[in-house]
Image (cartoon, rainbow, N blue to C red):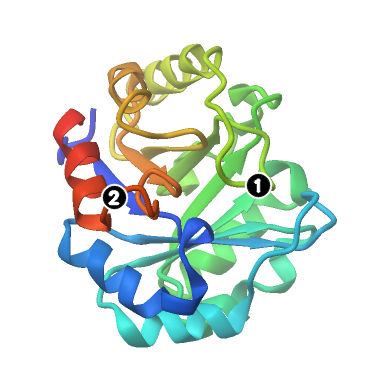
């Protein structure tokens, strides 16, 4: 496990009320969020369109938290510079979306930012074997990306365990395993037990059923 064993929480603004986005990000920050997760979708790589560079720029102005930008887009290498200039601290791109993993990782690193690579539920972890030494974070999708509020896929627990074992065996304990999809106070404990070190939570944080502070407290209490 990483030297800093505290599980990180990254609220995903995809589930936020965009009419109150600044207010809700501030509430999440005050409630103990470690970073803000920004989902960028192009309607091609995933069947949905979300947000882009202007939102990253706006979020950067209202929070001191690190921003991780999850590029669910084809040819993410074409937009790395722009999202970093907009204020992203970590760029996460998909193994399935580009044939040039090393080149993209090198570009991000050369710009002084952190590298993240994501894989979909149906993509084996061994597709990342040759890139693990070059990244800071692996984002495992535990739902099929494109929409928030989906149910966690239970078979992904074994996938998390396999990646944790691989990283430990190769002495890469400080590469974060972040998990995204269906994370709430019920699924989080088993995900952490399997080896995750960071959790992306959308509707579990930005829910109108209770306050953001209460939602964050409930999530933090179980991890």
Q: Secondary structure at mark 1?
A: loop
Q: Tell me the residue that label 1 is attached to.
A: 147
> In whole angstroms, how far apart are the C-alphas of marks 1 and 2?
21 Å
Examine the rendering and report whether any part of residue 193 can be seen: yes
Residue at 24% in and 38% down: 219
Location of the C terminus (image quadrant) = top left
In the displayed structure, does residue 170 sit left or right of residue 43? left
Out of 215 and 12, give the one closest to the viewer. Answer: 215
As displayed, is residue 88 above or below residue 136? below
Give the quarter of the image for residue 213: bottom left
Q: Earlier in the sequence, mark 1 or mark 2?
A: 1
**Residue 15 image position (x, y, % from top left):** 50, 56
As displayed, is residue 66 above or below residue 20? above
As displayed, is residue 52 above or below residue 179? below
Label 2 crowd bin: few (<14), some (14–19), many (20+), radius 10 Å: few
Residue at 59% in and 24% down: 125
Q: Tell me the residue that label 2 is attached to.
A: 210
**Residue 67 image position (x, y, % from top left):** 39, 67
Out of 26 and 223, give the one closest to the viewer. Answer: 26
**Residue 9 image position (x, y, % from top left):** 29, 47
Of tags 1 and 2, the one toward the viewer is 2
As displayed, is residue 25 above or below residue 161? below
**Residue 201 image position (x, y, % from top left):** 40, 45
Examine the rendering and report whether any part of residue 33 can be seen: no
Residue at 26% in and 55% down: 211
Location of the N terminus (image quadrant) = top left
In the displayed structure, does residue 129 sit left or right of residue 210? right
Label 1 crowd bin: few (<14), some (14–19), many (20+), radius 10 Å: some
Label drawn at residue 201? none
State yes or no: discs 1 and 2 in contact (Cβ < 8 Å): no
């Amino acid at each position: 496990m990483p030297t800093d064993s505290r599980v990180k929480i990254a609220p995903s603004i995809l589930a936020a009320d965009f009419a109150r986005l600044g207010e809700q990000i501030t509430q999440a920050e005050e409630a103990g969020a470690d970073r803000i997760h920004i989902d960028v979708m192009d309607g091609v790589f995933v069947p949905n369109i979300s947000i882009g560079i202007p939102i990253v720029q706006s979020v950067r102005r209202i929070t001191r938290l690190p921003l991780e930008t999850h590029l669910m887009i084809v040819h993410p290498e074409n937009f790395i510079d722009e999202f970093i200039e907009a204020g992203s601290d970590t760029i996460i791109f998909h193994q399935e979306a580009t044939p040039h993993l090393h080149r993209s990782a090198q570009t991000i690193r050369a710009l002084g930012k952190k590298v993240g690579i994501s894989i979909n539920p149906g993509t084996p972890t061994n597709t990342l074997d040759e890139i693990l030494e070059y990244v800071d974070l692996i984002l495992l999708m535990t739902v099929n990306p494109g929409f928030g509020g989906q149910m966690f896929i239970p078979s992904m627990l074994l996938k998390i365990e396999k990646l944790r074992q691989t990283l430990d065996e190769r002495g890469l304990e400080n590469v974060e395993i972040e998990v995204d999809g269906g994370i709430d106070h019920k699924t989080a404990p088993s995900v952490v037990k399997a080896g995750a070190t960071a959790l992306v939570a959308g509707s579990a944080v930005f829910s109108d059923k209770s306050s953001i502070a209460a939602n964050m407290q409930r999530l933090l209490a179980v991890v």
